[in-house]
Image (cartoon, grey):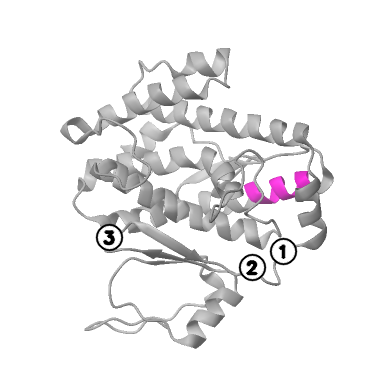
Amino acid sequence: MCSAPESEERKIPVSDVLAVIVAARGVFFSCEAFSRLTESGAIILHCDDSYQPLAKTAKISGVIHGPLLEQQVLKEKALCESIWTEVIKTKLYNQIILLDAIAPDHPLRKYFLSNVKDEGNAARAYWKYFFASFGKNAPKIREHRYARYPVNQYLNYGYAVIGAVLHRSIVAHGLFPQFGIHHMHRFKSLPLVYDLMEPLRPFCDFFLIEFYQHKGLREMSAWAKAVVRGLLELKVECKGKDVKLLYAIDLYVSSIAASLSKQFPGNLFFPKMPTLLQGEKE
């Protein structure tokens, strides 16, 4: 049950909650609510006064799958490289589809066709054309932490929201987020979340393009709702069927878990950007 001053109480089943975003002052949880949320596997994302993510609360104990954890520890380098190659290839594909809709003269496709491992040059080209869509509000650089430019602040917040949903699926499927397939573990880091986020970032970029066209960059609280709405409304193809991006993320993580369990790439599934984004925007 949720309530706020001068508003009626609202109730939703705890099992329907995948993530809770705390982005306002004066938010209180009862012990029972906190316990039930974590028991159900929900992720709680905590933000500061500027809506910048600070921390996550996630249930770990009792969720980690012992045999799968062992497979994560003993994973072969060749398997990790195979999965990572597909991760980067899908990220680049999704970026290309997005730029096709907003900057058709972009050069990203040549990187995809020639050398998908040239991630550095591809990234520089992507941000140049993506940022151009924001006119006078366009950042000069991509800032990952303590961003000064509003566009980067919005991106960082959106990535954190999607990352919280991804984190929840990783834990729910028995994977240990501290063991990545490409990024190395560092203190207080979640390498597997960072790794698997890569193909999902262009979806957040697309949500921001749409949001900017309709709302500008003045309402961070509205942007938070837009990200959640995008997760629930945007559909991607999976085995001939259209599924919501929110569920596609879970299928994506499930396929990664299966591959690590079998120590073989197998039938990996990656959420891919719909090719008719321009049509959806109109």
Q: Provide residue 97's location: percent of width, then percent of height.
A: 45, 28
Q: Amino acid at mark 3?
A: Ser
Q: Is residue 96 above or below residue 3?
A: above
Disc 2: which residue: 60
State the SS at label 2: loop
Viewer-nearest of labels 3 and 1?
Answer: 1
Q: Provide residue 84's location: percent of width, then percent of height.
A: 64, 34
Disc 3: which residue: 221
Q: Amino acid at mark 1?
A: Ile
Disc 1: which residue: 64
Q: Provide residue 255's location: percent of width, then percent of height.
A: 71, 46
State the SS at label 1: loop
For the view shown, which residue lies furthest in the left direction?
Answer: 136
Q: Is residue 22 above or below residue 196?
A: below
User: What's drawn in magenta, residue-wise?
Assistant: 252-260
| Quarter of the image where one finds residue 183 | top right
Q: Amino acid at mark 2?
A: Ile
Task: Say which residue appears at 71% left-offset and 60% top-offset.
Answer: 174
Task: Say which residue appears at 39% left-offset and 24% top-offset.
Answer: 124
